[in-house]
């Protein structure tokens, strides 16, 4: 086990505990939204990990299509699985916040709609792999889908600028204003983002290691199959 693998678990636990303390005890209650605003810190942290994961899927897919190395396929698949989990949690926490603030669980706002499409793209990415009869063919088709998902990531970023919607545009406006006026609110957001990003990195390394072991087991089975028959 290398140094990164030894340091990541305690770093994740420490940062998560710090994030929980700040969100539920440390940060002041928002005077307009009340306690429901506390979910915002976790919600934003989910999206940082989601976009990092799907960005990695796009890069890994592109490199896999170029040189067909299994390492890129492992990275793309692991990032897609984790990205889908964080994206699902991001959509759910957003709905929990939207109900008391917007009065509805869901609205077809441009950014929300494009985010739902993003979830569908990477759900299809994983479905393609599981349904393919030949693993390399499934990996290739999924990689093509993984690259195309980058377009949707870009559209999600631009949606609040190009189309009118009710989704908040950015954390800090062009005029320098921010919805997080208290310094402790900004600190809480940073700690939450760091905690979930470290969690993502830890899970990503574990999932890639599992994929490598699975490949080794499959190769061993393939070598033993002729002898058994």
Image (cartoon, rainbow, N blue to C red):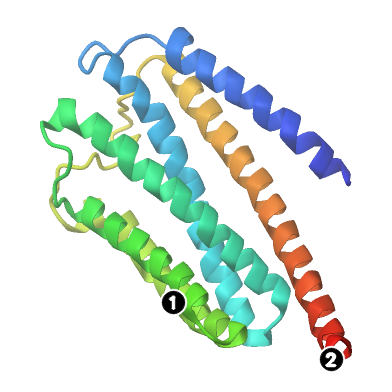
What residue is shown at x 39% (from left), y 14% (from top)?
182
Label located before the other in sequence (1 or 2): 1
Classed neighbour count for the residue bearing mark 2: other residues with Cα under 10 Å, few (<14), some (14–19), many (≥20): few
Write down the quadrant of residue 35 in the picture: top left
**Residue 43 picture location, percent across and down:** 38, 35
Q: Is residue 149 visible?
A: yes
Residue closer to the observer: 8 or 158: 8
Task: Specify the label residue 226 is tagged with.
Answer: 2
**Residue 19 picture location, percent across and down:** 54, 22
Residue closer to the observer: 217 or 59: 217
Q: In this view, does 211 lie to the left or right of 113?
A: right
Q: Is residue 215 left or right of residue 13?
A: right
Classed neighbour count for the residue bearing mark 1: other residues with Cα under 10 Å, few (<14), some (14–19), many (≥20): many
Mark whose residue sits in front, 1 or 2: 2
**Residue 99 picture location, percent across and down:** 17, 31
What residue is shown at x 19% (from left), y 55% (from top)?
110
Considering the image in quadrants, where does the C terminus appear? bottom right
Q: Is residue 101 left or right of residue 88?
A: left
Q: Is residue 183 visible?
A: no
Q: Is residue 80 left or right of residue 63?
A: left
Task: Specify the label residue 51 is tagged with.
Answer: none
Q: Evaluate if marks 1 and 2 touch, with contact meaning CB atoms under 8 Å apart.
A: no
Q: Identify whether 225 is placed above or below 147.
A: below
What residue is shown at x 37% (from left), y 42% (from top)?
90
Q: Disc 1 to disc 2, how far (Cα)?
A: 36 Å
Q: Identify whether 60 is placed above or below 27.
A: below
Write down the quadrant of residue 46 in the picture: top left
Which residue extends farthest front? 229
Labels in figure, total: 2
- Mark 1 lies on residue: 145
Residue closer to the observer: 178 or 195: 195
Q: Identify whether 86 is placed above or below 70.
A: above
């Amino acid at each position: 086990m290398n140094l990164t693998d030894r340091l990541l678990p305690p770093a994740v636990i420490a940062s998560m505990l710090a994030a929980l303390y700040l969100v539920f005890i440390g940060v002041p209650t928002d005077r307009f939204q009340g306690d429901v605003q506390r979910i915002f810190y976790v919600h934003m942290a989910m999206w940082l990990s989601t976009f990092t994961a799907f960005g990695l899927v796009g890069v890994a897919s592109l490199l896999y299509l170029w040189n067909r190395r299994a390492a890129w396929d492992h990275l793309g698949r692991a990032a897609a699985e984790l990205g889908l989990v964080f994206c699902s949690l991001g959509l759910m926490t957003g709905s929990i916040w939207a109900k008391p603030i917007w009065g509805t669980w869901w609205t077809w706002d441009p950014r929300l709609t494009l985010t739902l499409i993003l979830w569908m793209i990477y759900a299809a990415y994983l479905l393609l792999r599981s349904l393919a009869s030949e693993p390399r063919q499934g990996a290739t088709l999924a990689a093509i889908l993984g690259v195309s998902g980058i377009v949707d990531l870009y559209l999600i970023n631009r949606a609040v600028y190009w189309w009118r919607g009710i989704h908040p545009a950015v954390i800090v406006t062009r005029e320098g204003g921010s919805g997080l006026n208290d310094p402790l609110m900004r600190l809480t957001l940073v700690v939450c983002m760091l905690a979930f990003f470290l969690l993502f990195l830890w899970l990503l390394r574990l999932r890639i290691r599992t994929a490598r072991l699975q490949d080794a087991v499959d190769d061993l089975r393939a070598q033993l199959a002729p002898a058994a028959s």
